[in-house]
Image (spheres, grey):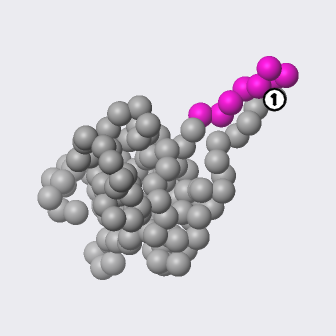
Amino acid sequence: MQNDLFEATLAVPPKPLSRPIVRRDGRTVPPDREHIGWVQEELFAHGFVRWAQQHKDEPLVVAVHFVKKRPKRGKFIVPIGRNHGDIDNFLKLLLEAINDYINDCMVVRVVAEKTYGDEGCYVVKVKALGVEYGLSIPPLTTL
């Protein structure tokens, strides 16, 4: 299968997707749609929409590396702790962003990590497994 791998570095600092907030008056404040829009703009600029149209009915493997900007001080070499966001919430934002182009229910495997770097960004790889994908799952090293 040709062109079954999409790779891009998105120049947007990663941000966890917050839960909707229910106010006292019962109204719901939705999560940050602006950040999702920035991620979608970067995906569009890297050709994800065209790639997604070719692979919309195929199972997908998503590998993502969330690079957070290194703080000026701190004792950890990786972003852990309360103020750095849960990795599942980072994933929610990315999957919400791609959901406009390709149904995220087609994702059968996710590999994710978060680290520090000089600038914040997403390093994204999405591999289409093909419509002939059966019960065998390729090893993680194939990404």
Please name the residue shown 46% across and 69% down the image.
11
Q: Closer to the camera, 84 or 63?
A: 84
Going by the image, does 76 lie left or right of 121?
Answer: left
Query: Residue 53 appears at what percent x and percent y?
Result: 52, 71
The range drawn in magenta is 19-26
- Magenta span includes 23: yes
Q: Is residue 17 above or below residue 124?
A: above
Q: Is residue 42 visible?
A: yes
Please name the residue shown 65% across and 42% down the image.
31
Say which quarter of the image contains residue 37: bottom right
Please name the residue shown 64% across and 48% down the image.
32
Please name the residue shown 32% across and 38% down the image.
80
Residue furthest to the front in view is 73
Residue furthest to the right in view is 25
Q: Closer to the camera, 132 or 37?
A: 37
Q: Which residue is mark 1?
A: 27
Query: Residue 57 appears at what percent x and percent y?
Result: 46, 60
Query: Residue 100 appears at what percent x and percent y?
Result: 60, 59
* Magenta span dominant secondary structure: loop
Going by the image, does 127 lie left or right of 138?
Answer: right
Give amino acid for label 1: Arg
Q: Is residue 75 above or below residue 93?
A: above
Number of marks drawn: 1
Q: Is residue 24 above or below residue 58?
A: above
Q: Is residue 48 above or below residue 132?
A: below
